[in-house]
Image (spheres, coloured by chain):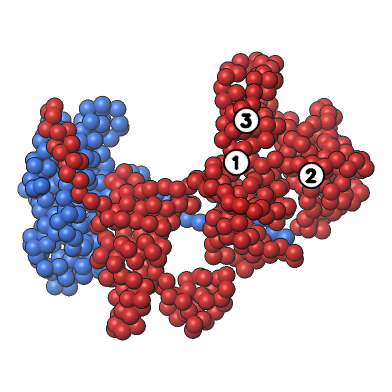
Chain colours: A blue, B red
Amino acid sequence: MSTNPRDMPKREGAFEREPARRVFAAELRECRYQFKDGEDEKSPTFVLLPTGERSNRIFIVGTLTEKTRQGDQNIFYRGRVVDPTGTFFVMAGSYQPEAMQQLAKIETPAFVAVIGKPSLYQKPDGSFMNSVRVESITVVDKDTRDLWVLDTATHTLDRIDAYNNGTDPDVIKAKEQYPGMDPAVFRRTAYDALAQIKI
Amino acid sequence: MNMDYSETAERISRKFSKSGQAIDIKKIESKLRRLVDEFGVQPQEAERSVTNELNKEFNIPGTGPGSSSGKAGGTNEQKKIADAVPGEWITIVGKVVALSTPASPSIAQSGIIADDSGAIRFVAWAKSNAPAMAEGAWYRIESAVVDEFKGIANLKIHSGTSVKELGTEESLIPSAVPVRDLHTGIGCVRAKVVQEWDASHERMLQAGLLGDESGTIKFVIWKEPGKEKLAVGGVYNIFYAQVDEFNGRLSLNLNTATIMQEDGDLPVSGGESIVKGSIVHIAPGSGIIKRCPVEGCNRALSRQNYCPIHEIQPKFVYDLRIKGWLDDGEKTHNILLQRDAVESLTGISLDAAREIAENNPLGMDEVFIRMRDAVLGRYITCHGREIDGRVLVNKCERLNFESSEHAALLNRAGGVS
């Protein structure tokens, strides 16, 4: 008889998937700092939100207003996803074939839900550009968009509260990296976004 | 019936005050009351489990390998089995409650020996020349060594150990503990079979989930002559099962256990969880799948209808499932939607899915795509049981927009700025 626990089936280890943060376009636009957590080549890269939270993945719901196909050999798609506070620039290339096909199929305008990785580029003129590399994009209804606004407003307000407490290491980092930033502006952003939902 | 626990609590407290720990008697009493009144634990067992819990809390005495097992002599007094600590030489009196086939020729006998305080696995080395012990008989075992094997305390009977049969016929009634209070070693529970899982190994007779009011635990029965499967929904008294720990999770190995089915039902509440969020990923293997038709197998087949155990199965059975990640912005939950949940969430029934799979150039992929497009990015609430970090969802619904929540958020955002 075997009582050897090693004979038992292997289960998934302690893998923790990075959560998809909820952030309005107006806040993501202000990001200027990204960092790697760890030395490894495969360590995840995080964009630090001005309200003091790291994000390796975000979940956004908005209106896909435009999409363009670019490149000859390496085809990729760019798109603009608009929320009540601004615009997300999304892209999907041949490294994300499924996401690219999904994006290629969608007729604009449409409400879309996007799961993707934020990244930060500095343009030659020194200005910053935030874009979201799409992991998946699907057409959704207006209800989902409205739920997202509530969800994102809640998370934004929670982050502002945590920022004002000021104890989290990422909050401290945000205060260093974004010295002129007053997170109160994002409270206003959240309010404006909520106010645009018609009941 | 309202019992008085003050005497027991007093006794426990005295035990600890000897070693210099002052413990609130009220606290002990409430722990006892909880175990006995809420969980139906027998008072004696409750006393033991509270004492053990406090022992752990105050780290009394040396739970680590304090005295090295090489040193003979010293502490070798008669002890209760529950007080056996790895690294010690001890003498116990107990009843052999289970014998199992030795795993190696260097072992003459292995099994479980119990007294009224608890039970422990034992191993008698072939070299020890100890007399063969019989199941159900009482023995006095002198100068055995307690050690730890795979995290479980084990009594080693070696050449310096004396084993004497006592000839008494005292009955020993083991008392069950709540599932939540099980710890590695030997345990007794009264629990209901709440789920049966796909056997993941050909030597496995049955695997599944046992539960009582306090929680749930995985169980395994390995194939062995005379072993029978448990009935799903059945309530069992399980005495002297081995509690293993693997990847930080406990599981019950029932091969050593004495199992008695009981009439009636047992409420199982533990493990039920509700998770909310948006679906951020649908994993491959979702949608319509084929399952192995061999009774008790039910594994998902490959595209070529191949079952890892039963090979090619052209008469497969269709099923629906969605594997994916549900994300609330702070944490991502691994979810597995079962057929009913898939049907209600996607609006695609099993029959409709089969129709699509059989009549579409993309076949089963078409079902995957349609289901993905119907649920990805949506906010849902899932009800189910969390097992090994995955929520098995039996019911789920779309989240609705609540205008009261909207109003409250407007207030919150518009308030102080």
Q: Which mark is residue B261?
A: none
Q: Are marks 2 and 3 in contact (CB under 8 Å)?
A: no
In which quadrant of the rendered image does the N terminus of chain B lie?
A: top right
Give coordinates of residue A68: x percent, y percent. 9, 66
**Label 2 environment density (alpha carbons within 10 Å; few <14, some 14–19, many ≥20):** many
Q: Is residue A18 visible?
A: no
Which residue is pictured at 67% across the width and 45% down the height?
A: B188
The nearer-to-camera label among 2 and 1 is 1
Judged left or right of residue B50, residue B308 is left
Q: Residues within 10 Å of mark 3 (few under 14, many from 20)?
A: few
- Residue with the mark numbered 1: B178
Circles 1 and 3 on the same chain = yes
Q: Secondary structure at mark 1?
A: loop
Q: Nearer the viewer, mark 1 or mark 3?
A: 3
Instruction: For marks 1 and 3, give the CA distance.
Output: 20 Å
Quadrant of the rendered image containing residue B8: top right
Q: Earlier in the sequence, mark 2 or mark 1?
A: 2
Q: Can the viewer see residue B349?
A: yes
Please name the residue that numbered disc 2 is placed on: B113
Residue located beneath label 3 in the image: B1
Cα separation between marks 2 and 1 = 21 Å
Q: Residue at x 38, y 48 (%)?
A: B274
Q: Earlier in the sequence, mark 1 or mark 3?
A: 3
